[in-house]
Image: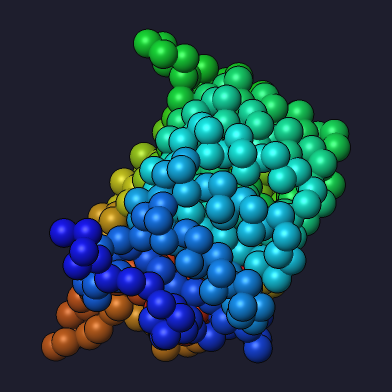
């Protein structure tokens, strides 16, 4: 079987490079596991890393590498780390959903300030608390990293303390951090109020974070009340992702109060939070005073009543450029209002996840995920390459 293994030569790697639209004149090396398997019937593993590093050293215009969904383990990390230590051209590294564990990340953290990486994604690797603590210590001295994704990495409250402490004290450069799915102690439930308290203290002090992703933590209304106290005193945050929590109508009261205070926030994601019509109405009273131009309220339990409250508050100074509503109980009344708002130009069908059409004086709709321009910026497999789906230029325009 090994004798039939497809060899990754320079020609193949060159063919896997695409224009990197985020940085004109540069390229991104796309070695995504699923695509590779369809082409060569295998995924990237540890033995391929030296070959890839040599290719990157010979092609300095390749400034980003996407190695998501492969089989890289701790054994492949030393070669990659040695390359990062001496190479200054690579700016973005995506290692999402590999088999990298504690040892590999501890070695990576030893780079400290000797790497020029601007973006590092470790989402989906079972790094654990010890490895993440080492990464936090690296962050305390690193001055180049701007975006860090450590969601779904088996983080717990202990490692979170390290990151929040660093963000409050020594690190003045990180702009975006993903902290999705923080775990509780073994055999115990996560104390979400303690997480909210740590984040509150960080938001009060930190003056550099512009994006914060807090999915799947289990925040309820009381936790949101704690978090909002920090948000009110923060003047830099532009994007807040609270998807897949338990905010509910009660939590929306506190979020609405924050939104009504005219914060700089431009993107708010509240998908899958059990928000009903009461929460929608509460938000609608304060939303016109906000600067939010991208709102995600999809997959909640709003009916026509709550959705109409939201739609009727969209005509404001800062017009909404992106609105996600799918997954709610949308009826013909909402569809009719959406149809009129699209015709009048208040909403744009290219940034609305509901397609509305009128047939024989009846208004019907269909849903699509293709207009979600924010999350593909992080999770679309194009990772900023030539892609008609996420279009990074549109992402930056919305942001």
The relative height of residue 70 versus residue 244 in the rendered view (above or below) is below
Which is nearer the eye, 159 or 278? 159
Confirm whether residue 256 shows in the render: no
**In the rendered view of the protein, which quadrant contains the C terminus?**
bottom right
The residue drawn where x is 85% and y is 34% is 169
Is 70 displayed left or right of 320 in the figure?
Answer: left
- Which residue appears farthest toward the top when viewing the image? 187
Image coordinates for residue 240, horizontal then vertical, percent: 60, 50
Q: How many marks?
A: 0
125 or 89, nearer to the observer: 89
Residue 204 in percent (x, y) is at 80, 36
The residue lying at 33 percent from left, 71 percent from top is: 7
Quarter that holds the N terminus: bottom left
Left-right relation of 353 to 177:
left
Hey, which quadrant is residue 230 in on the image?
Answer: top right
Residue situated in front as seen by the camera: 53 or 289: 53
């Amino acid at each position: 079987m090994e004798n039939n293994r497809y060899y990754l030569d320079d020609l193949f790697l060159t063919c896997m490079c695409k224009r990197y639209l985020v940085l004109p004149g540069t390229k991104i090396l796309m070695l995504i596991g699923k695509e590779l398997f369809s082409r060569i019937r295998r995924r990237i593993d540890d033995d391929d890393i030296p070959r890839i590093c040599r290719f990157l050293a010979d092609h300095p215009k390749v400034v980003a590498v996407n190695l998501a969904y492969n089989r890289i383990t701790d054994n492949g990390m030393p070669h990659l780390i040695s390359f990062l230590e001496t190479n200054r051209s690579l700016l973005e590294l995506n290692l999402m959903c590999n088999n990298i564990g504690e040892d590999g990340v501890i070695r990576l953290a030893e780079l400290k300030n000797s790497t020029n990486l601007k973006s590092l994604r470790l989402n989906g690797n079972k790094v654990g608390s010890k490895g993440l603590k080492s990464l936090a210590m690296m962050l305390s001295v690193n001055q180049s990293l701007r975006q860090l994704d450590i969601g779904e990495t088996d983080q717990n409250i202990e490692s979170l303390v390290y990151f929040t402490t660093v963000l409050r004290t020594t690190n003045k450069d990180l702009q975006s951090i993903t902290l999705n799915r923080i775990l509780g102690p073994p055999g115990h439930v996560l104390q979400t109020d303690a997480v909210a308290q740590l984040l509150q203290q960080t938001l009060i002090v930190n003056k550099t974070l512009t994006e914060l992703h807090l999915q799947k933590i289990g925040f309820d209304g009381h936790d949101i009340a704690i978090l909002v106290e920090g948000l009110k005193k923060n003047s830099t945050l532009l994007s807040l992702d609270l998807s897949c929590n338990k905010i509910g109508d009660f939590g929306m009261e506190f979020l609405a109060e924050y939104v009504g205070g005219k914060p700089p926030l431009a993107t708010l994601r509240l998908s899958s939070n059990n928000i009903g019509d009461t929460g929608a109405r509460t938000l609608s009273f304060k939303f016109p005073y906000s600067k939010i131009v991208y709102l995600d309220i999809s997959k909640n339990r709003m009916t026509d009543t709550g959705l109409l409250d939201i739609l009727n508050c969209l005509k404001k100074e800062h017009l909404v450029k992106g609105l996600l509503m799918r997954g709610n109980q949308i009826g013909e009344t909402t569809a009719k209002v959406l149809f009129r708002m699209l015709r009048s130009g208040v909403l744009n069908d290219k940034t609305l996840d509901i397609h509305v059409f009128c047939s024989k004086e009846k208004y019907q709709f269909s849903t699509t995920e293709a207009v979600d321009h924010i999350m593909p910026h992080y999770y679309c497999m194009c990772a900023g390459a030539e892609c008609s789906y996420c279009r990074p230029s549109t992402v930056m325009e919305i942001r």
